Image (tube, rainbow, N blue to C red):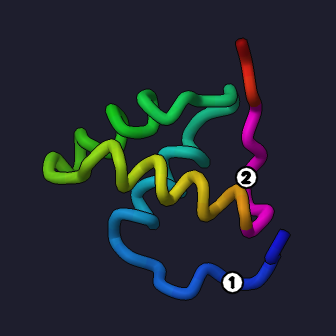
Amino acid sequence: MDRGPVKRVTAQRQAIVTALMSTTSHPTAEWVFDEVRKEMPGIGLATVYRTLRLLASKGRILELYTG
């Protein structure tokens, strides 16, 4: 796992981090997408998934598997 910095902090990535920090529960990607879309209607679900994957690979968030 690479714990280095996230190289590009885009507005979309910042909005996703803000959404994550606004909850005390473990949100789903869809929840994050819905929250961010309130402020950034043009964001795509794929962007949310890619950013969450990046943040998890950098050790910034934990990914939980349910099933």
Q: Which residues are magenta?
A: 58-64
Point 48% across, 57% down: residue = 50
Q: Quadrant of the N terminus?
A: bottom right
* Image height of 56 relative to 8, above or below: above
Q: Quadrant of the C terminus?
A: top right
Point 42% across, 49% down: residue = 48
| Earlier residue among tags 2 and 1 | 1
Mark linked to residue 5: 1
Q: Residue 11's spot in the image, x, y percent?
A: 34, 71
Q: Could you tell me which secondary element the residue under label 2 belongs to?
A: loop
Mark 2, Cα crowd under 10 Å, few <14 / some 14-19 / many 20+, is some
State left or right for residue 67 relative to residue 7: right
Mark 1, Cα crowd under 10 Å, few <14 / some 14-19 / many 20+, is few
Q: Residue 59's spot in the image, x, y percent?
A: 79, 63
The answer to whether mark 2 and mark 1 are in CB contact below 8 A is no
* Image height of 28 relative to 51, above or below: above
State left or right for residue 46 relative to residue 62: left
Q: Could you tell me which secondary element the residue under label 1 belongs to?
A: loop
Label count reads 2
The amino acid marked with disc number 1 is Pro
Foreground pick, 28 / 20: 28
Point 38% across, 76% down: residue = 10
Q: Residue 9's spot in the image, x, y percent?
A: 47, 79
The amino acid marked with disc number 2 is Ile
* Image height of 35 relative to 40, above or below: above
**Residue where numbered disc 2 is placed:** 61
